[in-house]
């Protein structure tokens, strides 16, 4: 999609907001506001007891506590989303994992936001110490995997990346069942 005009309205620590005049695939011209974001990585960490690591994290934008899987923003020096995922799992939960499965990516809000979040399943966990960054206010909880899925269905977990990551991880999690039957 050719950009005919672009004006940066705001540049922050993480995002950039542009006003852009673009030519769409049907040759019409549209004026858009686009938020450019470097993307992120999110991790569904499941231990040997079939419990998933959920963070209860304070999110000022929501003015509330939010249930999420560990996640972090990609940075310019990141070698890969996997490397960021490994770092964030350790920083936020204190865990490391020896088994990793890529669960694909999601687009957070593609009408206005360029962010892609890369999703991972982490298993075979070892526990260590957290190393939270400034501004991270969170609690680590280990919740039965099936209960977490039920919390998504019941609306107790509303964070989009967490909902999608949990459902994508379910097909790789051998202990997950639907009405007593493994979905394979």
Image (spheres, rainbow, N blue to C red):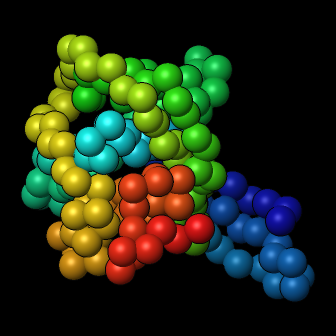
Q: Residue furthest front?
A: 180
Residue in view at x 26 percent, y 19 percent = 127
Residue 44, image x, y percentages: 40, 45
User: Would you say 22 lies left or right of 122 here?
Assistant: right
Residue in view at x 85 percent, y 62 percent = 2
Residue in view at x 42 percent, y 41 percent = 43
Name the one closer to the observer, 76 or 106. 106
Rendering quarter of residue 110: bottom right
User: Would you say 40 lies left or right of 133 here?
Assistant: right
**Residue 107 visible:** yes
Residue 90, image x, y percentages: 34, 21
Does 106 sit above or below residue 58?
Answer: below
Name the quadrant of the N terminus: bottom right
Name the quadrant of the C terminus: bottom right
Residue 91, image x, y percentages: 30, 22
Residue in view at x 15 percent, y 42 percent = 141
Residue 55, image x, y percentages: 21, 44
**Residue 75 visible:** no
- Give the total of numbered labels: 0
Rendering quarter of residue 89: top left
Does 163 sit above or below residue 82?
Answer: below
């Amino acid at each position: 999609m050719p950009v005919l005009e672009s004006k940066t309205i705001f540049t922050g620590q993480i995002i950039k907001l542009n006003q852009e005049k673009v030519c769409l695939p049907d040759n019409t011209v549209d004026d858009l506001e686009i938020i450019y974001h470097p993307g992120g990585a999110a991790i569904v960490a499941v231990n040997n007891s079939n419990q998933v690591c959920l963070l209860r994290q304070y999110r000022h934008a929501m003015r509330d506590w939010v249930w999420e899987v560990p996640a972090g923003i990609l940075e310019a020096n990141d070698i890969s989303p996997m490397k960021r995922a490994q770092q964030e799992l350790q920083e936020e939960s204190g865990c490391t994992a020896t088994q990793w499965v890529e669960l694909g990516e999601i687009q957070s809000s593609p009408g206005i936001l360029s962010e892609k979040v890369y999703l991972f399943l982490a298993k075979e966990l070892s526990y260590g110490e957290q190393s939270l960054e400034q501004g991270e206010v969170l609690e680590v909880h280990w919740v039965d995997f099936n209960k977490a899925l039920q919390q998504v269905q019941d609306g107790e977990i509303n964070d989009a990346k967490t909902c999608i990551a949990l459902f994508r991880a379910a097909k790789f999690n051998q202990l997950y069942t639907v009405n007593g039957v493994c979905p394979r």
